[in-house]
Each structure stands twice: as C-alpha cells, then as structure tokens.
Amino acid sequence: MTLQVQLRKKLEPFELEVDFECKPGVTALFGRSGCGKTSLIEQIAGLMAPDSGRIQVDDRVLFDSTTATNVAVRKRRIGYVFQDARLFPHLSVANNLRYGEWLTPKTERYVSSANVLELLALGPLLQRRPATLSGGERQRVAIGRALLCSPRILLMDEPLSALDGARKRDIIPYLERLRDEMRIPIVYVSHALEEVARLADTVVLLHDGQQQAVGSPQTVLTRLDLRAHTGRYEASSIVPATVQSHQPEFAVSILQTSAGRLIAAQLDRPVGSNVRLRLRARDISITKQPVQHSSVRNQLRGVIVDIAEEEGAFAEVLLELPDNTRLLVRVARINLKVLQLSIGDSAFASIKTAALDRASVL
C-alpha cells in the first residue's frame, strides 16, 4: 500500500503545506515541537480537514478538496496510536484488543490476533487491566489494538514520549518488528533524533509547517543546509553495517560497512545482523592521510563533498563514502586552514571504538 499526502492548512501562527508519499515501512515526521506534525497526522486520520489538497491510499481517495471528498474517520481504515495509550480502564487487555477487531467487518480483516500477540509479546498480559501495566506494556497493547483494526495505514503520534529511557529501549525492538513484518505505511511522529535514526526508512522534515526535505535518514540528517532544523550539537550520520564477527577476549565486535571495517564495543547482535550506526559528528576526526601508529584503528576513506563554515569555533565537513553513504565530521575552524581541507579532497575519518558503544548501534 502507498499513502500519498498533498495538503495545505492554515494554522496559527503558520500555514501547513506538505507533499510526500509513504510506502510500506516507517515514514518519520521529524521536527521541533509545534512545527505541525500532530496536526498533519490528524488530517490524515480525518480528525481535521485540510483547506485544500488530496490524501489517497492506493486508489482510494480519503480527501480531495476539488471534488469535496472527505471520508469519515470510521471508514478510513486507519490505525492511530496516541502519545498516551488511551486504553479502556474497565476492560482487560484481551477485551481492549478485541475492541480493535470489533471495529472491522470480518470480511475486511487481514491481521490475526495470534499474529499480534506474538509480534508484541502480549500473551502474558491478556487477563490484566491497564492500571496494572507499565507504560511500555500499555503502549504495546495500544499498538496491538490499532493493528487489530486491520488498518491500511498506521499513524503513531510520539508513542514513546511518555516513557523513560529504559521503557523506550524495551519497546523499540517491537516497533522494529512492526516495521519489518507488517509491511504497511507507518507514519511516525517524533522530535527525538535517536528514534528517527533507528526506525525511519524515510524522513519528512518539517519547520513551522513547511516541508524542508524528504529522503532517507542517511541523506536528510547529514545535509549541511538543514543543520538549523536537525540540530548542530547532536548532528549525526547514519551508516549501515553488518556484524561480521565477535572477539569476546577483547570485548569487541567487528562491523563491516561499505567503506571498510569498524571495531565496536561488543554487541549482543548475532553475526550477520544488519545494524545502523549513529556516528556523532563531534566523535569523528579527519585527516588527509591515513593515520598510523594510533590507538584509533577505525578509519574510513571518503571524498569531501561539502563544508559549512560559520561564526564560532567549529565547522562541519561532509564526507561521501563508497555506496553514497555520507559522514558528517565536526572540526575546529582553524583546522580547515591548517589541514587545507577543500571540497573534492580525499580524506580519512577516524572514529574511536569508544564512540561505537551499544547506544550508537541502532
């Protein structure tokens, strides 16, 4: 299924205007609080009408201002997961889940309760009431209820924002399974860079209601012209890698990227697993020649494709690695002159093993 969204809506203090497409997988609506993310998914859900535009799932039109089409919420076949779980407190987990099934005619159901129970590990919770669940457990039940509506698309409005760090880490693997196994468009609202980097297949970057960019996390989060919106201090690159081997005697894992091998702190991922590395720009140094006789053994070669130099002590250098992977490096401005770094130069990025800890492997 494919969701197409093209709409305009006057909001205070700005006008929301977007035009993008969501394929199966996670499309993250990313931006600072108040940029219009929640208003946007409310319009996709039918809770708010756009001023103009068109919303369509495959060949089914949900909204079209030119033909006065506006399908009712209950007929849109959309699953919605809110920031807070919004479970029915008087119902057991089992009956909260059944409520999702009750909303969908039997002939239109394609999601089985057995599949959802296994996907979200809800079996042990069925007889409990919401008040006895942890925050992460409540969100898993809310996701299960939304899935049992057999939705055409799934909307998730900052589903982890009410959880502490430990609970977020508990539930993210379930969201990854949901992304990989359900194969429906998932529109995921977040202003948390680490969630977007780990979960998103596509990022739609919003600022004051305006769509600034659409693309992969690897592309959008490393664009130097978008630093004001993606954040400079936490500026990062997303590098795909595969777990090649483990060396338990040194407590390290060997990862293979398109640009070369990396040594990371030991991971709990099996050999052959595909991972994403979130490499912070401030954790990487750059040289024009490979470094020898150094404790920093992780070096990736690339070509400088962009440099952003502004007032202040630091600048950003963008390296393009093999396979079009991009790596953002923060350097002292003085070193641009000392090293004579220029666009088009070959360069080497050095990354400490300490920077490749479990928190950076997504």
Image (tube, grey):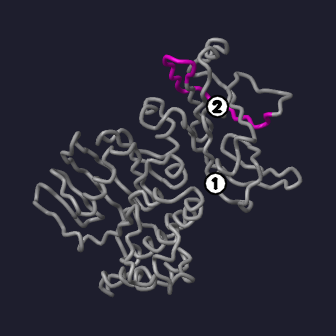
Residue type at the position of mark 2: Gly
Place of residue 118 in the rendered image (x, y in percent of width and height, measured from the top left): 55, 79
- Provide the residue span drawn in magenta: 296-315
Residue under pointer 2: 302
Task: Provide the secondary structure element on which disc 2 rests.
Answer: strand
Above or below, 349 against 219 in this view is: above
Residue at 54% over, 75% down: 119
Q: Position of 338 compared to 107: left or right?
A: right
Q: Does residue 317 show up magenta in the picture?
A: no
Task: Provide the secondary structure element on which disc 1 rests.
Answer: strand
Q: Main secondary structure of the magenta part?
A: strand
Front-lying residue, 128 or 239: 128
| Residue farthest front in this picture | 131
Kindly report the distance in space between the C-alpha atoms of the residues bearing marks 1 and 2: 21 Å
Q: Position of 155 compared to 161: left or right?
A: left
Above or below, 154 against 164 in this view is: below
Residue at 64% over, 56% down: 274
Q: Residues within 10 Å of mark 2 (few under 14, many from 20)?
A: many
Residue type at the position of mark 1: Val
Place of residue 320 in the rendered image (x, y in percent of width and height, measured from the top left): 58, 33
Place of residue 91 in the rendered image (x, y in percent of width and height, measured from the top left): 40, 84
Q: Position of 151 compared to 126: left or right?
A: left
Front-lying residue, 264 or 169: 169
Residue at 41% over, 68% down: 85
Residue under pointer 1: 275
